[in-house]
Image (cartoon, rainbow, N blue to C red):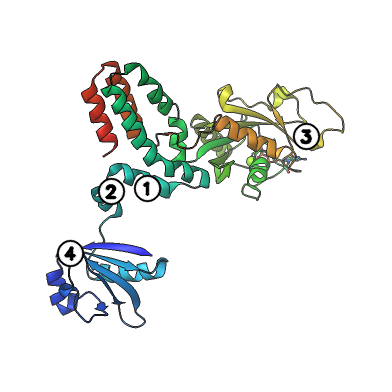
Amino acid sequence: MATIKVRADLSTLVTRPEHSIPFRAANGKSLLAQAWGRVVFGFWGAEPSEEVVICRLSDQEFEIHCHGGLAAARRIMGDLATLQLSPVDWDVQSRQSAGHLTTDCQAALTKATTLQTASILLDQEAAWRDFAARIVSAAMAGQWGELNAPIKRALSWQDLGKHLLEPFRVVLTGRPNVGKSALLNALVGYQRSVVFDQPGTTRDVVTVETAFEGWPVRLIDTAGLRENALGLEAAGIELAYAQLANADLVLQVIDATQPLELSVATSSPSAEKTILVVNKIDLLPENSQWTGPPPGAISLSARTGFGIDLLIAEIAAKLVPVCPADGTLIPFLDDQVRSLHSLTDAVERRSFQEIRDICDQILR
Ligand SMILES: Nc1nc2c(ncn2[C@@H]2O[C@H](COP(=O)(O)OP(=O)(O)O)[C@@H](O)[C@H]2O)c(=O)[nH]1
Ligand SMILES: [Mg+2]
């Protein structure tokens, strides 16, 4: 079912025929004659008409409940637009009736792209209410020593919180021809990026969204990094460096058949944000031990798929080293992080009044 709430001066709309709302109530009365708050069944528009339920909320407002799916809602919205009526914005309406915390949590839920992130976001309203109640009661009891730990704990989840709404950015980098594009395709299971045996094929930045172990990830394939590139390829390399600067994780890809010093690209993202991937191990002679890779590197073949699962597990573990327990408070908006910092300051000042105000603000 879909609900559309409209605010308009009904007296003018219902009495001027050219502006009349195309609603025929089953009880035969006009919309204006319906009692406030009464649920009225009827039909919308000319045949074939839509079955709807309308509720008049006041002289200025009514709600239309129509069948779910896009077609019915689109038709009604189209008629409303012809009448120059616009529905009340969901966000505004919800902030007025349900409050900011509920609305923020619901709006966030609409942006979740995996079941896991949706399930965490579903817990957040209750988690914030519980958190604020505990903080206020501990402050009221003067238990100052017990306030810092839960606030610090909540702040420790802020990076994950940001990524409940937007994917982690995982950038593939390395010298040309090491198999970055082939690896991106192997990770998502289909041919998203062009694979070619000439170096310098990928020039633009190619992105694809996926999820690893329930965490949303945007994979970003870039131009191979090498010195002395010219023209388009050089421009691609510049784009690649820009992506590296914003990466949550870098997959540094090298070719198992090449000497290590030739393979490692010139960029140097920080170690804890990097996974070294040794690709093309299918080309190594059987039983050969490639002594090149430092500890922690993952050897795989983008061509055969060997080692891909291990890489996926490693990516998930690097992005989210510890999974939150059910009900964990995870700040997912900048405002929430700011509130937690303000709480830390207020606790330091031992100001009960400030703590209560901040918690009131959180629970608005
Ligand atoms: N044998 C083998 N060849 C691979 C593998 N991965 C990529 N290649 C080949 O290496 C060449 C370059 O691959 P590509 O993905 O375009 O490299 P990029 O320049 O790093 O994006 C292509 O001919 C691929 O088929 C692999 O795991 N094994
Ligand atoms: Mg490529």
The answer to the question of whether label 2 and label 1 lie on touching residues, with beta carbons closer than 8 A, is: yes
Q: Residues within 10 Å of mark 3 (few under 14, many from 20)?
A: many
Q: Nearer the viewer, residue 350 or 260?
A: 350
Q: Position of residue 356 (x, y in %)?
A: 24, 28
Task: Pick whichever of labels 2 and 3 is earlier in the sequence.
Answer: 2
- Element carrying mark 3: helix
Q: Residues within 10 Å of mark 4 (few under 14, many from 20)?
A: some
Mark 2, residue position: 98
Q: Is residue 133 left or right of residue 13?
A: right
Q: Nearer the viewer, mark 2 or mark 1?
A: 2
Specify whether residue 155 is in view.
Answer: yes
Q: Nearer the viewer, mark 3 or mark 4?
A: 4
Q: Position of residue 147 (x, y in %)?
A: 35, 21
Q: Amino acid at mark 2?
A: Ala
Q: Nearer the viewer, mark 4 or mark 2?
A: 2
Is the C terminus in the top left, top right, bottom left or bottom right quadrant? top left
The image quarter in which residue 359 lies: top left
Task: Pick whichever of labels 4 and 2 is earlier in the sequence.
Answer: 4
Mark 4, residue position: 8
Task: Say which residue appears at 12% left-offset and 71% top-offset.
Answer: 12
Separation (CA) of disc 2 from disc 3: 57 Å
Task: Pick whichever of labels 2 and 1 is earlier in the sequence.
Answer: 2
Q: Amino acid at mark 1?
A: Gln
Q: Is mark 3 within 8 Å of ligand 1?
A: yes
Mark 1, residue position: 106
Separation (CA) of disc 3 from disc 4: 68 Å
Mark 3, residue position: 281
